[in-house]
Image (cartoon, helix red, strand yellow):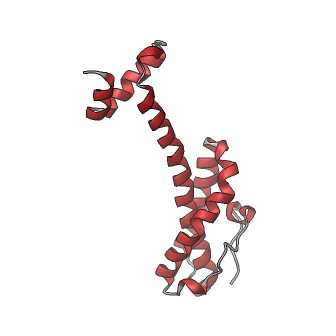
């Protein structure tokens, strides 16, 4: 089975074959087009995970601030966990994502507002149009907004 067919039929085997090719410096046998596609996908996945973590973090900060009468341990745990996943997880393991943070916050905010609105019963217009938290606040493990 040729390497392009292997990619379509058995991705795991294709990946292992490429590990062997690279380990043995058999570069002329690489399926370069699919390899580029997979590397691009990995980069997008990291950015997507950052945005998804920020959506949950920001939504819970909004809920914390706008429904202070319902603040509880589970919200605090979720906020802490998302911060940890962003800082100790993604940014520590992939420091090249740091310059993308501002854009990621912008991308995540409208989704975070929709989530917060859904979970609180408030309308989307109840929340600020732009993210009320700066990067330092979002990543500060001691920051919890006041209502």
Q: Is residue 141 left or right of residue 33?
A: right
Residue 81, visible in the rendered structure? no
Q: Quadrant of residue 31?
A: top left
Q: How many marks?
A: 0
Q: Position of residue 42 (x, y in %)?
A: 49, 41
Between 131 and 57, which is closer to the camera in this rendering? 131
Q: 81 or 48: which is nearer to us?
A: 48
Q: Return the x and y of residue 63 as percentages of the image width and height.
A: 57, 78
Q: Residue at x 52, y 53 (%)?
A: 49
Is residue 95 found left or right of 117 in the rendered image? right
Quadrant assignment for the N terminus:
top left
Establish if 39 lies above or below 6: below
Q: Nearer the viewer, residue 61 or 127?
A: 127
Q: Residue at x 55, y 83 (%)?
A: 124
Left or right: 72, with 144 as reference point: left
| Image quadrant in which the C terminus is located | bottom right
Q: Position of residue 67 (x, y in %)?
A: 58, 85
* Quadrant position of residue 141: bottom right
Left of 140 or right of it: where is 121?
left
């Amino acid at each position: 089975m040729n390497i392009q067919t292997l990619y379509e039929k058995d991705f795991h085997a294709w990946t292992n074959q490429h590990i062997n090719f690279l380990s043995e410096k058999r570069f002329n046998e690489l399926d370069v087009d699919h390899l580029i596609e997979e590397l691009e996908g990995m980069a997008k996945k990291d950015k997507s995970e950052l945005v998804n973590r920020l959506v949950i973090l920001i939504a819970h900060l909004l809920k914390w601030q706008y429904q202070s009468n319902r603040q509880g341990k589970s919200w605090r745990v979720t906020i802490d966990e998302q911060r940890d996943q962003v800082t100790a997880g993604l940014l520590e393991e992939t420091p090249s994502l740091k310059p993308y943070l501002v854009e990621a916050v912008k991308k995540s905010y409208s989704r975070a507002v929709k989530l917060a609105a859904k979970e609180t019963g408030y309308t989307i217009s109840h929340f600020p149009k732009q993210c009320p938290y700066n990067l330092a606040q979002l990543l500060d493990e001691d920051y919890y907004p006041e209502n």
